[in-house]
Amino acid sequence: GDSVTQMEGPVTLSEEAFLTINCTYTATGYPSLFWYVQYPGEGLQLLLKATKADDKGSNKGFEATYRKETTSFHLEKGSVQVSDSAVYFCALSSKTSGSRLTFGEGTQLTVNP
Amino acid sequence: GAVVSQHPSWVICKSGTSVKIECRSLDFQATTMFWYRQFPKQSLMLMATSNEGSKATYEQGVEKDKFLINHASLTLSTLTVTSAHPEDSSFYICSARADQDYSNQPQHFGDGTRLSIL
């Protein structure tokens, strides 16, 4: 079945540092890939998405490129801010999974001033 | 756009009480809605998928009679936790998707409901 593996957290960075959160996936066919962010006590917000190989999703300074050859969708940001502190979830949807989202375990990011 | 409203955001009630949680899509019609449960510091666990006008599809291990789901319109789904007990305490999150084309349509999430059963 489908699966998503994220780098283990927590991740702690200083403000303006470079961020990478690794995400790799296993799926049959050509899944769509998503990054969601969850702030404390809240639901999930869609951060960015990519629906086919080599697509780059971007939003609020975050980027991720759909790499089919490495089955990866790593999240990056060049300069993090304190307000980026949250839990980040990588997810996919595919025909195999029907209408469901398959989530990674989530990565807690803390950015210190 | 694509706003999902979930209500209430926090519920505290006594053991044995039934609790209803509402999930509304405010600016789009949601063909499909999903209900998740999230334990502290963990990922989301899908409980059930509901399509408007039809019975919900529950994930393995989720009690249908315990967690009643109704998706009566294209903008509203409800989750009722019947005869809630302390072990049902959790963070419940709904999401909605506009149409059947899952490949391009992300799910949009509500802000969650924190349920505490005393």
Image (cartoon, coloured by chain):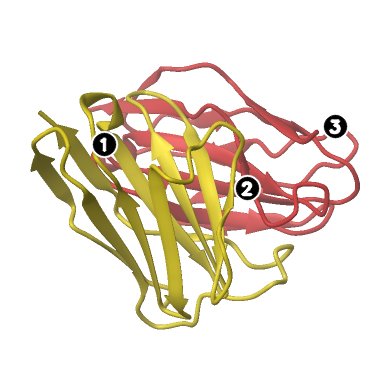
| Labels 2 and 1: the sequence-earlier one | 1
Q: Alpha-carbon distance for marks 3 and 2?
A: 20 Å
The foreground one among A6 and B19 is B19
- 3 vs 1, front mark: 3
Of all chains, the one bearing label 2 is A
The residue under the point 65% across, 35% down is: A74
| Labels 3 and 1: the sequence-earlier one | 3
Residue B98: assigned label: none
The residue under the point 25% across, 38% down is: A40
Q: Position of residue B75 (x, y in %)?
A: 41, 78
Q: Which residue is mark 2?
A: A101
**Colour yellow maps to chain:** B
- 3 vs 2, front mark: 2
Task: Give the crowd class for mark 1: few <14, some 14-19, many >=20 residues within 10 Å.
Answer: some
Q: Alpha-carbon distance for marks 2 and 1?
A: 28 Å
Can residue A34 be seen?
A: yes
The foreground one among A33 and B13 is B13
Image height check: is B95 above or below A67?
below
Image position of B36 (left or right of A24): left
Which colour represents chain A?
A: red
The quarter in which the C terminus of chain A is drawn is top left
Q: Alpha-carbon distance for marks 3 and 1?
A: 31 Å
Q: Which residue is mark 1?
A: A82
Of all chains, the one bearing label 1 is A
Q: Which residue type carries mark 1?
A: Val
Q: Which residue is mark 3?
A: A70
Q: Which residue type carries mark 3?
A: Thr
Residue B13 occupies which quadrant of the picture?
top left
Of helix, strand and loop, which one carries label 1? helix
Disc 2 with disc 1 on a shared chain:
yes
| Labels 3 and 2: the sequence-earlier one | 3
The residue under the point 31% across, 35% down is: A85
